[in-house]
Image (spheres, helix red, strand yellow):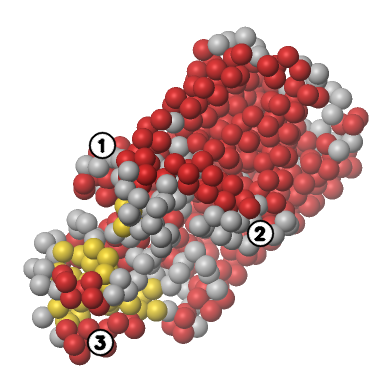
């Protein structure tokens, strides 16, 4: 019996959601994920929901909501990697649902389902389930805000309130720049369709007012932690205003590169980042964008499509012009990318469809070749099980899924995404985490020395140790700090190998356990090759002073 298009797409969406579940039961990765987890842990340990602490000091970078969400999950499920990852996983699914709702309202159900499918199967969406960052929250909240403002545009005032709430949530994750993907599309849509009266419509100014109301908890928290205490040292100086940082330095300061956090911008950065981050759909996305430049290809689309295109284009341009760029930022406009791609895919036919089926087959084959190369060199523990899994994924993709139609193109692409997700979650990421020494040191300490008072010496990036170690972790930034606390009973210190000799000689330190370390989010050829891996491994130690 022939499966209906919509039934097939619904089945694939369910499979993608199920494939992400194993990610919830593995470890939290450094740096960002483990940092956010440790800061959320501190909220619970201190029962302090207003002040954020990271690396043992006041922390001012992102707003509070990411940490509040994780801390609430810790309250419910206990402090664990599962409790940390669960909200991100659920909000990712919520984002797919809002994407479906928005695309269905503007177009129809088939486009909506394909859009949700593309979003969930894009590589960076998949990896965000495992390596939890703030961007999946922003993506969902901005998309939810766009959806409710779209409904408000159709004379439903209640949606102004809900849209403003979600816009405020996005701001409380990242900052006020997230209003760009929310409002840019609407403003350009009104200008292009000559709906100039919307620019002075009172409900949109009420929306701005409501956003300001909804972000007041963040403003209060920043004021009490920083503005009320100008003597605090933040960014190596005093007199730092939390409110000024929130409204200016964290956003405009990064864009113009004149704030306390600087970067090096490259205008082509997100063009090549999207090529791998939006796999396996990136070639189709670029073709879809080029297709939109031809007026005849836009004529039969709903006028509201401008909201989607403009939101993506303006945000992408601002990201590209910014002097501070990170790959995961692009996730914020993946929903818009997904709709643009879904619309284009459905128009493919004849020779054009055959060309893109061929291109897509080459792209998918390259993914399997890459997985095979990783398998050959990495040295997995269950070596032949991993190989069988890769070959089974390739067989299903190219021999089980047959045909020369759009369903074949979509089905094969999603099959590769499912294979890739399960390869990452079941084999690759767990193998990488064997070299995240802080996590293993923290777990070992909790299991073998639960009364220990954990600390870190002369190392500022021990985020996974901070999260997994029992209780609160102290940070000693020099030996003077250590001397003030060395008499603490059951003090156990996590240290890099460079400090071991001095600790043994001058402090009579006893080594409790050693751990292998590599910066697993910056992979190199020597690390991936099992034969040369030992050459690039560092070593960390848990030591007790005698």
Say if mark 2 contacts mark 1, CB within 8 Å. no
Q: Quadrant of residue 490?
A: bottom left
Along the viewing direction, whichever of 318 and 119 lies nearer the viewer: 318
Q: Quadrant of residue 87?
A: top left
Q: Among all residues in the image, which is located at the extreme top? A: 155
Q: Position of residue 173 (x, y in %)?
A: 46, 40
Q: Quadrant of residue 49?
A: top left
Left or right side of 5 for 405? right
Q: Residue at x 48, y 27 (%)?
A: 212
- The vertical placement of 281 against 542, above or below, is above
Task: Return the mark for residue 502.
Answer: 3
Q: Residue at x 90, y 31 (%)?
A: 295
Residue with the mark numbered 2: 265
Residue with the mark numbered 1: 76
Say if mark 1 contacts mark 3, CB within 8 Å. no
Q: Earlier in the sequence, mark 2 or mark 1?
A: 1
Q: Position of residue 385 (x, y in %)?
A: 46, 63
For the residue carrying disc 2, how many other residues have a C-alpha within 10 Å: few (<14), some (14-19), or many (20+)? some
| SS at circle 2 | loop
Task: Return the mark for residue 133.
Answer: none
Left or right side of 175 for 416? right
Q: Among all residues in the image, which is located at the extreme bottom? A: 505
Q: Earlier in the sequence, mark 1 or mark 3?
A: 1
Residue 523 visible in rendering: yes
| SS at circle 1 | helix
Q: Position of residue 6 (x, y in %)?
A: 64, 26
Q: Earlier in the sequence, mark 3 or mark 2?
A: 2
Q: CA distance from mark 1 to mark 3?
A: 43 Å
| SS at circle 3 | helix
Q: CA distance from mark 2 to mark 1?
A: 41 Å
Residue 365 visible in rendering: no
């Amino acid at each position: 019996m022939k499966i209906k298009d919509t039934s097939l797409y619904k089945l694939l969406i369910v499979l993608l959601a199920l494939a992400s579940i194993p990610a919830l039961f593995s470890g939290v990765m450094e740096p960002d994920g483990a940092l956010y987890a440790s800061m959320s842990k501190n909220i619970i340990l201190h029962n302090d929901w207003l002040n954020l602490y990271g690396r043992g000091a006041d922390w001012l970078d992102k707003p509070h909501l990411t940490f509040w969400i994780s801390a609430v999950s810790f309250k419910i499920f206990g402090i664990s990697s599962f409790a940390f990852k669960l909200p991100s996983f659920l909000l990712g699914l919520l984002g797919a649902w809002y994407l479906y709702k928005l695309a269905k309202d503007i177009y129809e159900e088939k486009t909506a389902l394909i859009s949700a499918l593309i979003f969930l199967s894009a590589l960076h969406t998949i990896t965000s389930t495992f390596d939890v960052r703030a961007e999946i929250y922003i993506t969902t909240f901005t998309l939810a805000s766009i959806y409710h403002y779209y409904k408000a545009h159709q004379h439903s005032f209640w949606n102004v309130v809900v849209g403003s709430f979600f816009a405020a949530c996005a701001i409380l994750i990242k900052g006020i720049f997230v209003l760009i993907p929310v409002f840019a599309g609407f403003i350009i849509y009104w200008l292009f369709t000559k709906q100039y009266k919307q620019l002075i419509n009172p409900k949109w100014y009420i929306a701005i007012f409501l956003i300001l109301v909804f972000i007041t908890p963040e403003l209060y928290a920043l004021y009490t932690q920083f503005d009320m205490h100008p003597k605090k040292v933040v960014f190596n100086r005093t007199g730092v205003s939390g409110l000024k940082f929130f409204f200016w330095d964290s956003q405009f300061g990064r864009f113009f590169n004149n704030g306390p956090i600087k970067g090096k911008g490259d205008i082509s950065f997100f063009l090549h980042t999207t090529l791998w981050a939006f796999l396996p759909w990136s070639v189709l996305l670029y073709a879809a964008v080029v297709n939109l430049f031809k007026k005849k290809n836009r004529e039969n689309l709903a006028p509201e499509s401008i909201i989607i295109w403009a939101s993506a284009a303006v945000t992408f341009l601002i990201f590209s012009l910014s002097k501070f760029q990170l790959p995961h930022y692009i996730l914020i406009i993946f929903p818009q990318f997904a709709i643009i791609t879904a619309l284009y895919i459905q128009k493919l036919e004849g020779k054009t469809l055959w060309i893109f089926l061929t291109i897509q087959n080459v792209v998918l084959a390259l993914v399997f070749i890459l997985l095979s190369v990783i398998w050959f060199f990495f040295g997995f523990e269950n070596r032949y099980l991993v190989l069988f899994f890769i070959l089974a994924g390739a067989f299903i993709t190219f021999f089980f899924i047959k045909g020369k139609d759009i369903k074949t193109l979509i089905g094969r692409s999603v099959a590769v995404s499912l294979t890739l997700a399960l390869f990452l979650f079941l084999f690759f990421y767990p193998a990488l985490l064997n070299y995240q020494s802080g996590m293993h040191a923290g777990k070992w300490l909790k299991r073998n020395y639960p009364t220990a008072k954990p600390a870190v010496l002369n190392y500022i990036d021990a985020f996974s140790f901070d999260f997994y170690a029992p209780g609160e972790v102290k940070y000693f930034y020099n030996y003077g700090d250590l001397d003030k606390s060395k008499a603490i009973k059951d003090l156990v210190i996590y240290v890099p190998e460079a400090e071991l000799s001095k600790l043994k000689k001058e402090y009579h330190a006893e080594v409790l356990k050693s751990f292998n370390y590599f910066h697993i989010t910056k992979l190199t050829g020597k690390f991936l090759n099992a034969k040369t891996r030992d050459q690039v491994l560092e070593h960390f130690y848990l030591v007790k002073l005698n």
